[in-house]
Image: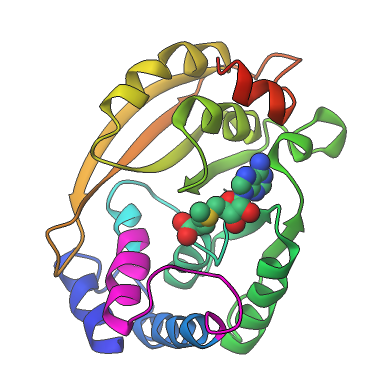
Amino acid sequence: MEQIISAGLEELGLTGRVPKDAPALLAQYGQMLLEKNQVMNLTAIRDLEGVARLHMLDCAALLKFCDFEGKTLIDVGTGAGFPGMVLKILVPSLKLTLLDSLGKRLDWLSEVYEDLDCMDSITAFHGRAEEFSAPIKGYRDSFDLVTARAVAELRVLCELCLPFVKVGGRFLAMKSTNSDQELEDAAHAIKLLGGRMAGVEDYRIPGTEVVHRLIIIEKVAPTLKGYPRRWARMQKEPL
Ligand code: SAM
């Protein structure tokens, strides 16, 4: 797995920009994922190469489009740590917050970052995004960056994620390339929640024909009071 990751990082043009031990650490993380996946539902990908490419390199590709150095980042619906943990391994100065509504996954992730022994500045919260971004919690309009992969349809995702982003910061939504309709549908939500479309970047995952998409939304105004709404309401009446 280490070799595939190393070659993939090179193909992405990231060698020299990431720590030397990053491929080894990502491979160790991938091994732990596959082992734990036998007893806990963490990923549908069950082979070493798939994990290396479709998890590690997919997430690593974000470094091509955004500077993560020293930034605060919350990964919403992180699951088994994607993309948050991969970004942290590649950019150790990142101040990472992991958020997920499933506590067991976060418990496992805390074992991972203790084992990798290089993971300072990580905070993990068990909870729902729409509750954590309430003004009273202190996380609203406060992160430089917010990431999410495979969590919800873009309109709903914007309501979950944009409230966390500080003005001038960015929300990075990882999507497939057949998200054109989602993008169109989300235009109103993005504007209402204080965002502005800043870019759509398609990239091929090294060693595959898979092309994924990064949607970059800039925060230009604080999110209005009243958002995010309750989960059931968001689902029933997406913005
Ligand atoms: N981001 C990871 C990835 O790409 O592999 C996990 C994707 S998994 C399909 C979706 C994750 O989002 C689950 O772990 C789920 O518990 C979490 N999730 C869904 N809705 C959420 C919410 N409203 N707040 C926090 N976490 C949520």
Residue shown at the point (42%, 29%) measured from the top left: 217
* Residue 198 appears in the picture as rendered: yes
Q: Which residues make up the magenta segment?
A: 36-59
Residue depicted at x 56% and y 71%? 41
Q: Residue at x 65, y 19 (%)?
A: 223
Residue 228 visible? The answer is no
Image check: 179 left or right of 211? right
Quadrant in the picture for residue 187: top left
Please tell me in which quadrant of the rendered image residue 205 appears.
bottom left
Q: Quadrant of the C terminus?
A: top right
Quarter of the figure with residue 213: top left
Q: Where residue 193 sits: x, y (%)?
A: 58, 17
Q: How is the image coloured?
A: rainbow
In the image, 141 versus 192, the foreground residue is 192
Q: Nearer the viewer, residue 173 or 97?
A: 173
Q: Quadrant of the N terminus?
A: bottom left
For the point 71% across and 34% down, the residue is 130
How many numbered marks, from 0 up? Answer: 0
Q: Is residue 171 above or below residue 193?
A: below
Horizontal side of 98 relative to 218 (left or right) equals right
Residue 70 within the segment the image draws in magenta: no
Residue 51 inside the magenta-drawn segment: yes
